[in-house]
Amino acid sequence: MVNTIRLTAAQAMVKWLSVQLTPDGDRYIDGMWAIFGHGNVAGIGEALHAYQDVFPTWRGQNEQTMAHAAIAYAKGKKRTRAMAVTSSIGPGSTNVVTAAALAHVNRLPILIVAGDVFANRRPDPVLQQVEDFDDGTVSANDCFRPVSRYFDRITRPEHILYALPRALRTMTDPANCGPVTLAFCQDVQTEAYDYPVTFFEPRVWRIRRPQPDLGELAHVAELVKDAQNPVIISGGGTIYSQAEETLATFASAHNIPVAETQAGKSGLSQDHPMNLGASGVDGSAAANVALENADLVIGVGTRLQDFTTGSRTLFREDATLVSINIHGYDAAKHGAQSLVGDAKVTLEALSAELGAYKVAKSYVAAREDWLRAVDAYCARPDDQSANPTDGQVIGAVQRATTETAIAMCAAGTMPGALKLLWQPSQGGYHMEYGYSCMGYEVAGAMGLKLACPDREVVCFVGDGSYMMANSELATAVMRRIPFTVVLTDNRGYGCINRLQTMGCGGEPFNNMYVDCNVDAQPEIDYVAHAASMGAFAVKAKDTDQLEAEIVAARDRNIPTVIVIETIAKDFPGTGIETTAGAHGYFWDVAVPQTSDRQKQRDRFVEYLTQISKQSLVN
């Protein structure tokens, strides 16, 4: 006879999650972020209360941003641990859809437990229920389907016996890792069932390391041996595989230089001699010139997004592309010769195949030229009375932070600037640029600090992103989670303004406050706003004060917000400027084919020239 325990479906879910472990004995799901509503408070809320001593609950201020915090936590833990979020039916659930898309694009695990309609349908339509006139099975949670790696609707209490293991199998699968959504009908959450006691025995989840196919490995090894000027592009998969040291050893042993993507930056520390910096649209002169001349490009753990490849214009037409990736879908992109496998074991195996192979060409001079240009661009401004550039702000923060600091950001000008200019130690960079989601920054900094409590976390955020989502500052204050926010105020959406006016040939419109059709220019006191949520907030009058405030923030146990006004200066990231050692590449943002303005017509002619260089191989 099977021993059973009678629990509600929600109680059983929380009890089960509390005993899912990593090989180190930690909880794999390290608690659940929750905002309660009528669709989850009676079921999941009661269950979380019942098990609060063994499974923590984290209260958020907004469903999207609390999910951002959970995602940043998983990214900070290199996908070895994750968090869950629960929301109510209706807007609570759909608020999380944006975060699910962010996790999906970035291949990051998160468990989303969304309240749903009544499975028994007796009270339909309930408050906040979305009704499809032609399909009685649809609810608002169907919005999660295209942005979830695994989706399930729990309409009976015994469904969790199958749905929960499938959820964690997906989240811990290095190839299919991403968001999982369980749409949990609110009446089913409260229904009791006799669950097998064995279901709640602790289970260890191990992340596998698939070995490369021997045939693919031998073929790629021959391609590398035949190459004269190979270059590596390292992506986020290098970090998630914990292959940082393996990459460093591989690059040094074979004298193959390394360029970085946004997700891959800091896989190698900036002082590693083979690190040429950023690739692509916002790339360094050292990296992009090397890639221009490469006869073989080796992608490691990258999905080769448009910024990385200059919208498919960066590589030589006759260059061979090799892609080492955990998933065949990504490994075959751009007509690449695929080498499917875990980054760490695949680089080790490829190095063994290459033996004494070593590239003769040296990139030392190009690397040093680029770093000198970065230092000059980020140097302390002589005139401290003028508003600094974003590069000068980055330089000030770099000078003031410790070696273990992590710079993090998500959208606007700063991602391109940081990718080019920030000089991190290994692991000292956290960028959400797969989805480039404005509003990720503050919540992401909180989740990152939870994941990396011993490292200094500095969040760069523009005034535009800050205005979109800032309320998790209050959560961080309540939880005493310290990190530093550097809020650069250029009075609008400066990055998109540059793209509009320079990249696309348009006129300034609706991005900077001064170019909006408004009766009065806003005068927003960001210091007072942040302070009202309990953060320590201060306005730095110049970069000297910024440096001092960065140092002072390290002694606090609450978030520090440092506001500094900047100028919306043209900056690498649109493929137009070549300052700071940048050698920016074309970014394909479609330009109108017809216009009454000559500037726009001239820009379209330039656009045609650029797209004629694009590779059409997929």
Image (tube, grey):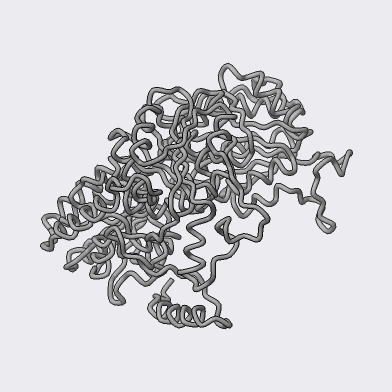
**Picture quarter with the N terminus:** top right
On the question of residue 342 being in view, the answer is no
Q: Does residue 584 sit above or below 191 in this rendering?
A: below
Tell me if 361 is positioned left or right of 2 in this view. Answer: left
User: Residue 153 occupies which quadrant of the picture?
Assistant: top right
* Residue 258, image x, y percentages: 25, 55
Q: Does residue 542 sit above or below 499 in this rendering?
A: above
The residue drawn where x is 54% and y is 26% is 477
Tell me if 173 is positioned left or right of 1 in this view. Answer: left
The residue drawn where x is 31% and y is 41% is 398
The residue drawn where x is 70% and y is 40% is 92
**Picture quarter with the C terminus:** bottom left
Q: Does residue 87 sit above or below 315 in this rendering?
A: above
User: Residue 76 occupies which quadrant of the picture?
Assistant: top left
Tell me if 228 is positioned left or right of 566 in this view. Answer: left
The residue drawn where x is 62% and y is 19% is 51
* Residue 570, image x, y percentages: 40, 61
* Residue 519, image x, y percentages: 68, 55
